[in-house]
Each structure stands twice: as structure tokens, then as C-alpha cells.
């Protein structure tokens, strides 16, 4: 097992993500799905832009805080060739829009709502993600 | 104005959660998915913590007549499992296992300026934008 295992911090961070998703539900009555929030900006509707931009600005603001106070948690290079990162980014961008959600919308929100669509999505992306990560790990000797 | 400011705060809380949990470290995510390698189960604890909180909130909040700032609930109602859902999830999973980023952590990390993050996030946004263009073109036909 990895020496980097962080059960307490990861549970605490997860609880904050759940808290944020719950605030979104209480205020806007919506699912806090990041790919959906970003995707909606590519087909903008009047009155439906401000909250999306503000939420995403909040993510970026957190990232600035991370870069200033805990750079090791956010300014990290991954051991992948640039073309692999391009392919990975395109797959994540297209896949999350085609499948209506990602780790937040289907994972956190959908599983909490016990949605059968989200369960099917999570099982699929976890399984395919594991197969790809294991295969790339065998080929490259694992993520650094 | 007040609602915009609070949306910003909700985003900050989400981003801080991603940072603390380790989701913004692609190697940690890949080590969760690579179950035959240097396995790091942390991501399971992220999901556990998030779902524990949100599962309870979801049992309580929708009992209100409406959300505080919207006229009605805007939650998904579909329950069917179609090919589009599964193909999309499979493509996303492949990219996630390859790059180690899902959309939230990529957008949170992009200001830190690591070249891997910039390349991944640029390609991700291009994929989302390209998909929107493709959908719009298909709808016109």
C-alpha cells in the first residue's frame, strides 16, 4: 500500500465537498456537478451565467490559496507525456458532457440521491479508470 | 449580488475540500485507481466523507417548498440507463485513469501553473466546447 495514504485529511476534505454540494442544493436547488456547471457556460442562457462563473471563480480562488500556502498539494507535474495529457483531457471533457456528469455530479451528488443512472456511471468510470491506470502503471512503472 | 458572493463562497469550500482531500494530486488519484500498483485508498475516504454529509442533507433539504434562491427544484429526474450515459462514463474513466484529473481538481489546480495541469485543462475545456458545438450542430439537423 502507498505510504501517502491520508484517511483523515481525505475524509475531512470529502466532508467539505459534501457541505458545498449541500449548500448548492439549499440555495440553488441544483446538483453541484463541476462538468455540468462548466458545460452550461458553452450554451449560455440569460440569468444562468453568474452563479456558474462565481462558483468556478471560487474553485480558482481556493487554488490560489493552495498555490500560496501548500504548493505541494496543487502545483504538481504528473509523469505523463504531453500527448497523453491532451488525450486524457479530451476524453474527460467529452466523456463528462456525453455522460452528463463526473465524480461530483454522479459520484457525490448522484450516489447521495441513490440515482440508478449515477450508480451505473460511477461503476463504469471507476472500472474503466482502474483498467487504464493499471495498464499505464504496468507500461510506465507506476505514477511517481 | 449577495447570491453571486455566496456562490463564490460555495465554490471556495468545494475547492478547499478538493485540496485537503488530495484530489488535486493526480498521482494520488492514479494510485487509487491502479489497484495492482502502489495502492492508495484515500479517494475512497473522500467519497465516503462527501456522501455521508450530502446523503443526510439530501434527506432533509428537498422537504422545503423551494430552494432559497430559485423558484423550484432543478434536480435530475431521469432514471433510465442508456448507451450515451455508459459510453460517456467509459470515456471519462479512461481519461481520468490516464491523466489523474477529473474536472473539479483540474480547474482548481490550473492557477498553480504546472505545465501538465495547463495541458490537461486546456484539452478538457476544448473537449467540452467541441461537444457543445457538435450537439448544437446535431440539434439543427
Image (cartoon, coloured by chain):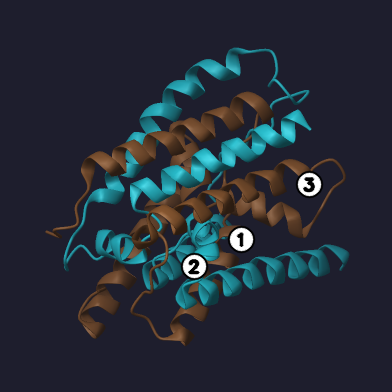
Q: What is the letter of the brown chain?
A: A
Going by the image, does A26 lie left or right of A86? right
Local SS, label 2: helix
Quadrant of the drawing holding the C terminus of chain A: bottom left
* Residue that extends furthest to the front in the rendered view of this protein: A68
Q: Earlier in the sequence, mark 1 or mark 3?
A: 3
CA separation, marks 1 and 3? 21 Å
Going by the image, does A42 lie left or right of A141? right
Mark 1 and mark 3 residues within 8 Å of each other at the beta carbon? no
Q: How many numbered marks does the figure carry?
A: 3
Residue at point 26%, 58% (across, down): B32
Q: Hue of chain B?
A: cyan
Kindly identify which numbered label has been placed on residue A32: none
Local SS, label 3: loop
* Residue B131 spot, x, y in % from top left: 69, 68
- Placement of A68 over or under B117, stated as above or below: above
Residue at point 64%, 40% (across, down): B8
Mark 2 and mark 3 residues within 8 Å of each other at the beta carbon? no
Residue at point 58%, 42% (across, down): B11
Pinpoint the chain carrying mark 1: A
Which of the pair B111/B39 is nearer the observer?
A: B111
Task: Please identify the quarter of the rendering in which residue A11 is found.
Answer: top left
For the residues tagged 2 and 3, is the chain the same?
Answer: no
Pinpoint the chain carrying mark 2: B
Quadrant of the drawing holding the N terminus of chain A: bottom left
CA separation, marks 2 and 1? 9 Å
Residue holding disc 2: B91
Residue holding disc 3: A49
Residue holding disc 1: A98
Q: Residues within 10 Å of mark 2 (few under 14, many from 20)?
A: many
Pinpoint the chain carrying mark 3: A
- Placement of A140 over or under B10, stated as above or below: below
Amino acid at each position: 500500500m502507498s505510504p501517502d495514504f491520508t484517511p483523515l485529511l481525505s475524509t475531512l476534505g470529502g466532508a467539505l465537498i459534501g457541505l458545498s454540494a449541500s449548500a448548492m442544493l439549499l440555495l440553488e436547488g441544483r446538483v453541484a456537478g463541476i462538468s455540468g456547471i462548466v458545460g452550461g457556460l458553452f450554451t449560455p442562457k440569460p440569468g444562468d451565467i453568474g452563479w456558474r462563473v462565481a462558483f468556478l471563480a471560487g474553485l480558482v480562488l481556493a487554488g490560489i490559496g493552495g498555490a500560496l500556502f501548500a504548493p505541494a498539494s496543487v502545483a504538481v507535474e504528473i509523469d505523463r507525456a504531453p500527448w497523453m495529457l491532451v488525450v486524457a483531457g479530451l476524453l474527460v471533457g467529452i466523456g463528462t458532457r456525453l455522460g452528463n456528469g463526473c465524480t461530483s455530479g454522479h459520484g457525490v451528488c448522484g450516489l447521495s440521491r441513490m440515482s440508478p443512472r449515477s450508480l451505473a456511471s460511477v461503476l463504469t468510470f471507476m472500472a474503466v479508470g482502474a483498467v487504464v491506470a493499471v495498464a499505464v502503471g504496468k507500461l510506465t512503472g507506476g505514477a511517481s | 449580488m449577495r447570491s453571486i458572493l455566496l456562490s463564490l463562497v460555495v465554490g471556495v469550500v468545494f475547492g478547499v475540500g478538493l485540496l485537503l482531500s488530495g484530489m488535486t494530486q493526480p498521482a494520488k488519484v492514479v494510485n487509487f485507481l491502479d489497484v495492482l500498483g502502489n495502492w492508495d485508498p484515500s479517494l475512497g475516504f473522500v467519497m465516503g466523507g462527501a456522501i455521508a454529509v450530502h446523503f443526510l442533507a439530501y434527506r432533509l433539504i428537498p422537504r422545503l417548498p423551494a430552494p432559497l434562491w430559485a423558484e423550484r427544484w432543478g434536480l435530475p429526474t431521469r432514471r433510465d440507463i442508456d448507451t450515451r450515459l455508459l459510453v460517456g462514463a467509459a470515456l471519462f474513466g479512461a481519461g481520468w485513469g490516464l491523466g489523474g484529473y477529473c474536472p473539479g481538481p483540474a480547474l482548481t489546480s490550473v492557477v498553480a501553473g504546472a505545465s501538465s495541469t495547463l495541458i490537461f485543462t486546456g484539452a478538457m475545456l476544448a473537449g467540452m466546447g467541441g461537444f457543445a458545438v457538435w450537439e448544437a450542430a446535431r440539434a439543427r439537423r
